[in-house]
Amino acid sequence: MSTTRALSENHLNPNHSSTTKCTSEKDFPRSPMQASPDSSNSPVSSHNELLQEPPVAKPRATPLPWAHLVVVFIIFVTDVLAMTSLTPYLPFLVESFGVVHDRTKLGYVAGLVASSYYFAQLFSSIFWGWVSDRVGRRPVMLIGCFSSCVCSLAFGFSRTLSWALVCRLSYGGLNGILGSMKTSLSEVTDKTNQAKAFSYIGLSFGIGQFLGPLMGGTLALPVETYPSLFLPSSPLYPIKSFLEYFPFFLPNFVIFLVTLCGTIIGLFLLNESNQDVLDKRERKKKAADEQNLLRHVNTHPGTPSAENLNQEDTPIKPVEKRSFFASLKQSEILSTPAPLTTSLIYSTLGFNSVLFSEVLPLWAVLSPKKWGIDFNSSDLGVLMSASGIFILFFNLIFLHKIIDRIGALNTLRTGALLGMPFLCIFPEISLFFFPRPAMFLVWSTLFILVLIRQLTSQLCFSPSIMMINNSVTFRSMGTINGISQSAVAFMRALSPALGGSVFAMSVNNNIIPFDVHLVWVWMALNNLITMSLSFLLPKSINEPKNVPATMETELNDDEPKDIEMTAMGGH
């Protein structure tokens, strides 16, 4: 408002110059040519001086709000632990239910269990985003942490397929951590430190990916894996029968303890980042103070406070409310293709990520004659955890530098392109078993391929999240995050069920590439689709979108409008 008023006054004042003149030559830096006395009177030199612009210094990066970020990332790590710990032992869990007796058919049921979490997220992410806009990011993340505690502990008691599905559906339906975390990061960062902050999403995921599979793979089936620890003379012998009856309780109990610690940390240290919620709290506090003052002046009508209150009393404007769909039609999300395109890219990445996590253990437990490598849950846990260590250092040291150097858009394209050829090589590792097993080559090749897959995935995910937020101004940032989370939840729910079914059908086919190779080629083609979609985005997607002047005027208004479901965070 003040800016508009100043411009109007300048326009009405004839004595005010409309342009700003340079009063001194030292206002602009001089080049060596300009400083030369011989060339000071040259017409060419004078022309160059007029055309030369002062150098624009690169803005210094704003310090990251570490007190807030550390707590948010701890909560996110606990959430990732709960998600990734299931991967190594999922085929063995499904096998223990007794509903599938052929290992080549495990993919059907394993896909159903894995997709149930994302199926629940498909319907709950918009709701939790709406809640986070109304009551804040903090309550949603704390509820997500607590639900992770309860559902992880309950999942450890799974003895039937129906119980496992109920636990996973409950966990997905009550969890809104990721969407709230991404929105919170956007609220506390700017374009100078955005890349670094969002690279720590990958760092947190790397920590969870390192510890989660390690916990799941090494702690599942403890009596079968470590029989010497449960001898009659061992102090663990009294719980042997319990762990035999619930062979997957131990990893879930550890996850329960970790997520409980995350909940307690968040309860005491996590601050609210939603400025609208903070403003509403301030207005409520101010209204309560005014009510107390009003009660006071009613009992003392002759006081100066009562007279001031009557003089300053102004009518309250009615609150404008619009439905979500009415707000969406008038929002910037549908005005350009970038917001929905970035959401589509994010959903294809989510589809491929879950597909890889689903197929890897199903393929690894197959015999070499079926293009597998005959691994167990412990082998898979060690493998995925070892690759997670490198992900930690990559995200901590290199990722944000790569994004700053070549931009989020080119970083995503690089990751999608590099990942394609290596995905197709996984089934060929089984060739090292013939004529006799060469386990060193099996382990080393598999580790390199998994590491490349994880690194290229990190090159895609963090930039895609940045570009989603950069596709709109902050007024629509929550909404687009909710839309993207709903889209990726749908793809992640579809991926395990569809991928597991395709894998199970391809195992019994002996025609290349329609045998086990089919699903790996499919993942490579998904990378190609992701990279192709990125060419629909403008280069401006690399930086946060500027806020229009009209929007700034609205933000400076003393009475902001309450818009029904203006932003959605979701998981």
Image (cartoon, rainbow, N blue to C red):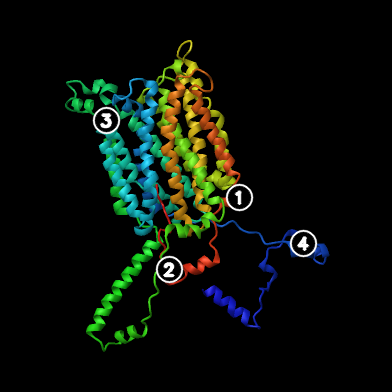
Q: Nearer the viewer, mark 1 or mark 4?
A: 1
User: Which is nearer the N-term, disc 3 or disc 2?
Assistant: 3
Q: How many residues crowd around disc 1 within 10 Å: few (fewer than 14), some, or many (20 or more)?
A: few
Residue type pointed to by label 4: Asn
SS class of the residue under badge 2? loop
* Residue contact between numbered discs 2 and 4, judged by CB atoms under 8 Å: no
Q: Position of residue 508 (x, y in %)?
A: 45, 19
Check disc 3: other Cα within 10 Å, few if <14, some if 14-19, many if 20+. Answer: some
First along the sequence among labels 1 and 3 = 3
Between the C-alphas of marks 2 and 1, the distance is: 32 Å
Say which of marks 3 and 4 sits in front.
Answer: 3
Which dot, 3 or 2, sits closer to the camera? 3
Closest to the observer, 384 or 28: 384
Question: Mark 2 and mark 4: span between their CA atoms?
Answer: 49 Å
SS at mark 1 in the image = loop
Mark 4 or mark 2, which is nearer the start of the sequence? Answer: 4
User: Which residue corresponds to mark 4?
Assistant: 48
Q: Amino acid at mark 1?
A: Pro
What's the amino acid at mark 3?
Thr
Q: Secondary structure at mark 4?
A: helix
Q: Which residue is mark 1?
A: 538
Mark 3 element type:
loop
Q: Earlier in the sequence, mark 2 or mark 1?
A: 1
Residue 280 coordinates in the image, percent (x, y): 36, 65
User: How far is the residue under mark 3 from the one under mark 2?
Assistant: 52 Å
Residue at the disc numbered 3? 160
